[in-house]
Amino acid sequence: MSERIFVDSSAYYALTDVRDQNHAAAVITVWRLAREGNDLHTSNFVLAETHGLILNRLNRDIAERMLDETCAGATKIIRLLERDETQAREIIHQNKDKEYSLVDASSFALMQRLHIRVAWTYDQHFEQFGFRRIM
């Protein structure tokens, strides 16, 4: 059964870096999600974070290829609205016992706005915030 799924930078990174501990699982997951016809979404913040991670940890060519492939692929890249950014800051302020990054919190705000309940992520923060996590 297909569903709407938010893709986090941890999933993109695991898929890209063959040395990542989650790489094998990510390859299986991406094929399963494609076979099931899931509707994948991510944000411009996640895309920027992923590019930076790959640029710093791997190299420029791989980072550029990831950027081009993601932008040309089927994943919908949603731009954050000002209200998403405001909501993200509120999430950070209201959860002082958590270490949510601004990208995490903006993803939560975007997922709430779009009524997406599932995230493909290797980051436990999504589950802490109440979303279902697939890995």
Image: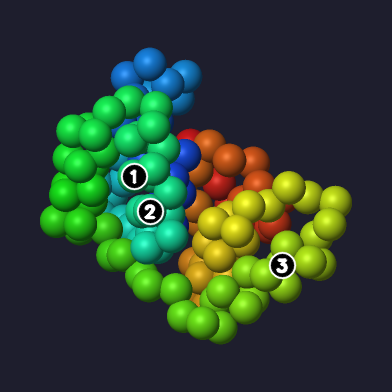
Q: How crowded is mark 2: few (under 14 residues within 10 Å), some or many (20 or more)?
A: few
Foreground tag (2 vs 3): 2
Q: What residue type is labelled 3?
A: Ile
Residue 62 vertical placement versus 1 (above, below): above
Foreground residue, 101 or 26?
A: 101
Q: Dot 3, crowdedness within 10 Å: few (<14), some or many (≥20)?
A: many
| Residue 23 picture location, percent across and down | 38, 24
Q: Name the residue under label 3.
A: 91
Task: Inspect the image, locate mark 1, and give the three-letter code of the amino acid beneath it.
Answer: His
Residue 21: x and y in percent read 47, 19
Residue at 20% across, 42% down: 64
Mark 1 sits on what residue?
Answer: 51
Q: Mark 2 points at which residue?
A: 48
Q: In this view, does 48 lie above or below 28?
A: below
Q: Which mark is residue 3?
A: none
Q: Distance between the residues labelled 2 and 1?
A: 5 Å
